[in-house]
Structure formats: C-alpha cells, structure tokens
Amino acid sequence: MNRNPVWYYNIVAHPDILIMVDGEEKAYRARRVSDEEKRDLWPHLLSMYPDFDEYQARTDRNIPVFSCQPLAG
C-alpha cells in the first residue's frame, strides 16, 4: 500500500484526540513529526516495537510518526 491508512487522514484533519492512559481517557494534540525528528525518534520507536523496521522495509511509503502532547485540562 502506497497510501497512508485512513486513521492518518483523520488525525491530520482532527489533531485533538483522546488516548486511553492507565484506564483514563486524556486529551492530546497530535502533530506529525518532521523527517529529521522521525530519524531521531526511530531507535526509541524500535525499542518499543522492533517490527517497525520490517514494516518500513516493505513499503516505499514514509510511515508517518506523530508526537502527542497533553492538552491543558
């Protein structure tokens, strides 16, 4: 697949999201990171989910990575 999944377009259109953290929904704002930020974050992402490397190798698509910052409550 050379297109981003539907969830990507939903987050781009509506970056204020809810994420379940320790059984509690919390509000965040999602921002797609730059390619430079992604390069710096990639080792950390692989430490949490090593299959990301294999997934990226199987596609020509630049897999999007988002940073989610808590919204003030």
Image (spheres, rainbow, N blue to C red):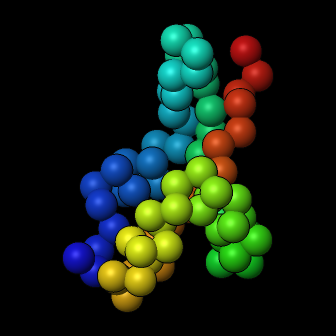
* Quadrant location, the C terminus: top right
The residue that appears at 71% across and 28% down in the rendered structure is 71
State the residue at coordinates (30%, 61%).
5
Image quarter where the N terminus lies is: bottom left
Which picture quadrant has residue 29?
top right
| Residue 34 appears in the rendering | no
- From the viewer's side, name the closer residue of 69 and 41: 41
Q: Is residue 34 above or below residue 72?
A: below
Point out residue 43 in the picture as x, y percentages from the top left corner: 69, 67
Q: Check the image and name the residue furthest to the bottom.
A: 60
At horizontal 34% and vertical 82% (from top left) the residue drawn is 59
Left/right of residue 36 with respect to residue 47 in the rendered view: right
Question: What percent of the width, then of the height, locates residue 3?
Answer: 29, 74
43 horizontally vs 48: left or right: right
Residue at the image position 58 percent from the left and 16 percent from the top: 22
In the image, 70 versus 60, the foreground residue is 60
Query: Residue 51 location, x and y as percent?
Result: 44, 64
